[in-house]
Image (cartoon, coloured by chain):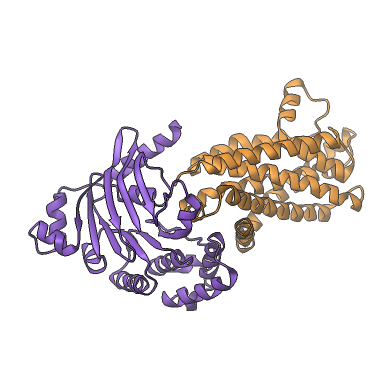
Amino acid sequence: MGAIYILWLRELKRYVRSRVQVAASLAQPCLYLFAFGFGFGAVFRQAGRGSYLQFMAPGVVAMTVLFSAVFSGIAMLWDRQFGFLKETLVAPVSRLQIMIGRTLGGATVAIIQGTIVLGVCLLAGFRPQSWLALPGAFLFLFLIALVFAALGTALGSAIKDMQGFQIVMNFLVMPIYFLSGALFPLDNQKMGMRIANQIDPLSYGVDGLRGMLTNVWHFTPSTNLTVLTVVAGAFLLLGAYLFSKIEV
Amino acid sequence: MISVRNLVRRFGDFTAVKEISFDVAQGEIFAFLGPNGAGKSTTIKMLTTLLRPTSGSIQLDGMDPNVHQKEARQRFGIVFQDPSLDQEQTAWENMELHGILYHVPRKVRATRIEFLLKTFELWERKDSLVKTFSGGMKRRLEIARGLLHTPKILFLDEPTLGLDPQSRNQLWTHVKALNETEKTTVFLTTHYMDEAEKIAHRIAIMDHGAIIAQGTSAELKQQTSTDSLEAAFLALTGSSLRDESADAKAGLRQMAQMWRR
């Protein structure tokens, strides 16, 4: 237990201490929020779908959580580079505990980031259907964070250099984001798009978050919960397996 | 304390360590000398559970580190060839984290951290981030950290690489003092003959994966009829250069090995 706690705490400390990084990582979602949120607003309203800001705000929150969670997993590359990873890998604690501590730390940081961006959305004029919906929204926030922190850990264990990191960002994380319905509604899509949406685990996270906050659902709440839970479990297992295979 | 018999490690068709055997007694300081790519680091990795031997046996404090991994890890401290500190945390936090990972009880932890940081002259900087430390300070902190859980054996893999003579000297003074007061067995590798001569009770010379000689510094000199350890070393290993590419190749092989699995 001590090992999980201290590694979780380490992720948090790193986050709090790197203020520049915090600001930089919040800038991107804010850009999306303002550029798209206001830019597409007029078209969206003409199409009879109401406020685009209201629609996309949950998507931007989900995006923040996705990026932050995957990043913190891949930050393992730095720990590998600077050697700290070795210190934890020769300690007399199981790799599983180390992996869980790191992953929960990454998930916690992602939730904090998501909460901040949700705050920014509120400032920009986003309004949830009811303040009582917030706990439910946070449940989805937590699940998204867990799914992608676990994926980040798996990726961080498998890739060994910065090139690999670029490939992952461009060919995995960005598609996960764009195909998730964070920016556009999932209904009435063509077959190919529909399949892509359904494969993308973030779709269920975005839908859950949006459903809770604005009461617009594409899937059902129970589908979202089930898929996210199962995927989180699968990614945690994969992460634990790949982490246990790291050689130093 | 350490007993190794016919230890072998292969990477594909390349044999990095060939049938080596040696013993290190409790409280002894034992040095491994050898040119680049001789297999020193591979040996340390096998001794410290980071790499599985292809064949042969290892006993640390009467225990096989590959069978009783956690128990073995609790019994040794290690300072790696490359740094392994968390740069973004303070010296104290690095020690605290290590203490928790190694199950050092809370009360003991605080006093032991204070004692070690004072011994290694880092107490004044305990709340500074490690990234602000000099190379020598980082090394001292790593050694202090390695000793935090009162290990029976301390492994030092080229701990003085890249340090100035003052830092090297100071570092060895501390290590020697702790070896005497806490009876910690020390297993080290180094390139610096003078260090090995000054600090080690016994020395093994390794080349091309095999131990080609071992004994006290005096014995090695006598064996080769030379008058310095450096001359003895050169007489034993020859004076041809082992370029760094040996290391790079070994690294590639290791990588290839990893992907094949």
Point out residue B7 in the picture as x, y percentages from the top left corner.
Answer: 31, 44
Q: Is residue A214 left or right of residue B210?
A: right
Q: Nearer the viewer, residue B209 or A155?
A: B209
Chain B's shade in the image?
Answer: purple
Point out residue A122 in the picture as x, y percentages from the top left corner.
Answer: 83, 54
Residue drawn 67% across the image and 43% down it: A148
Point out residue B233 in the picture as x, y percentages from the top left corner.
Answer: 16, 56
Residue drawn 30% across the image and 51% down it: B40
Residue drawn 76% across the image and 42% down it: A36
Please determine whether, in this image, residue A207 is positioned above or below residue B239. Answer: above
Q: Is residue A125 left or right of residue B143?
A: right
Q: Is residue A6 left or right of residue A214?
A: left
Q: Quadrant of the N terminus of chain A?
A: bottom right
Give the quarter of the image for residue B171: bottom left
Q: Is residue A76 left or right of residue B195?
A: right
Q: Nearer the viewer, residue A92 or A245?
A: A92
Give the quarter of the image for residue A41: top right
Q: What chain is colored orange?
A: A
Please determine whether, in this image, residue A218 is positioned above or below residue B195. Answer: above
In this orientation, does residue A85 appear? yes
Point out residue B105 in the picture as x, y percentages from the top left corner.
Answer: 57, 68
In this orientation, does residue A181 appear? no
Give the quarter of the image for residue A45: top right
Q: How many marks?
A: 0
